Every structure is written in C-alpha cells, then in structure tokens.
Image: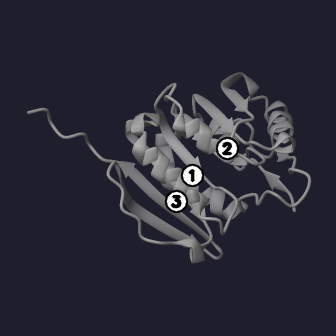
Amino acid sequence: MSIRVISGTAKGAKLKLVPGEGTRPIMDRVKESLFNILGRDIFDCTFLDLFAGTGSVAIEALSRGAAYALLIDNDVRAQRTIQDNLKITHLSDRAAVRKVDAFLLLRSTPERAFDMVYIAPPQYLGLWKKAIDLLDAAPGWVAHDGIVVVQIDPIEREDITLRTFQLFDERRYGSTLLQFFRRLALPAPE
C-alpha cells in the first residue's frame, strides 16, 4: 500500500508508512472526499490531528493551504514517519509534531483554538468517543466556528450526547465512516 498527497503544493508526493501494524492510513478516495467536503474552509485554517499516524491528513490540509498543523501521536515510529513526510513535502515550517498521549493533551489547558480537529484513533476501543467527550469538556481546543471530524469503522458508530458539539453530517465509504461535528454557538449573555 502507498499513500500520496492528492492536491495542493505537495500534490503527488509519496508518503512513508509507519513501520508495523499499528496504524491504518486513510484511503485516498476517503481523503479526497473529506477535503471536498471541507472545501475552501481548509484554506488558512489551523488543524489539530490527534492520532496522526503517518501525518497524511494534516499534510493534505497543509498542502491545500492550511496555515498551521499540530500533529499528535504517542508512538515514536509514527513521530519519525510524520517528520520524514513533512520533509518530503517541504511543509515542516508550518507544522509541529509532538509525541504525547492525545488524552493527556486534551486534559491540559488549550494552547490555542483550532479551526479543525481530526480524530482517527486505533479502532474498536471506543477511543474516538473518549476523545470527543474530552473536547466537549474542554471546548477551548476548538474555535467557535470550528469543526471536529471523526474517522471510525461504521460498526463503532453510536449516538452520543454532547453539550458543546453537534453532529451535522456523516458519510460512509465502505469500511470508513466520517462524522462531522460543529461547535455550537455560545448562548448570548443575559
């Protein structure tokens, strides 16, 4: 299997895969559909990739004009792969890579509000739900008009109740389900 950058300044660049079986890179057609849905909102946005793996989703965002991406993964092999892929695509200057547990990060004080947050954790462990619950409890990680995208296997889908975010779209591509959550407007002060 190979993965590549589909569009933008790094179009066609072949990305390295993380050694071993721990990551599941997004298929090109799903990634292309994702960015077609996000459209021009990707331009000049800030992007947080919580379980970055190869980094291909955040790298695609940068290639298509995102201003900055923070890529999080707690696996040292993934971190090395992400750094290599950022060098291959010449996008290192607009990205930061951190080896940290995503759940610990989300429990810390938000350092900034991101326009887009991407959650694609290891499957079948309920980690996506844990991540979005933490974001719901600490919404400062997401800009007021921000979007959270969750990538899971459709069999993991379950209805969840959130205070700060609302599901506004979901798309299925074979064994991949993308869910799109919008941050709800804050109530007007009384």
When asked about the image quadrant of residue 178, the answer is bottom right
Instruction: Residue 114: give x, y in percent of width and height.
Output: 49, 34
Q: Using the rendered image of the protein, determine whether residue 49 is visible from the camera's viewpoint.
A: no
**The disc labelled 2 sits on which kind of residue?**
Glu
Q: CA distance from mark 2 to mark 3?
A: 24 Å
Instruction: Residue 17: give x, y in percent of width and height.
Output: 86, 51
* Mark earlier in primary sequence (1, 2): 1
Query: Which residue carries the number 1 mark?
Result: 35
Quadrant location of the C terminus? top left
Indicate which disc residue 60 carries. 2
Q: Which residue is rendered at x = 49% and y = 62% of the image?
A: 179
**The disc labelled 1 sits on which kind of residue?**
Phe
Q: Which residue is rendered at x = 71% and y = 60% of the image?
A: 28
Q: Between residues 80 and 35, which one lies in front from this camera angle?
A: 80
Give neighbour class at mark 1: few <14, some 14-19, many 20+ (Cα, 10 Å): some
| In contact (CB < 8 Å): disc 1 and disc 2 | yes
When asked about the image quadrant of residue 156, the answer is bottom right
22 left or right, relative to 100? right
* Mark earlier in primary sequence (2, 3): 2
Instruction: Residue 91: give x, y in percent of width and height.
Output: 74, 29
| In contact (CB < 8 Å): disc 2 and disc 3 | no
Give neighbour class at mark 3: few <14, some 14-19, many 20+ (Cα, 10 Å): some
Q: Secondary structure at mark 2?
A: helix
Q: Secondary structure at mark 3?
A: helix
Query: Which residue carries the number 3 mark?
Result: 129
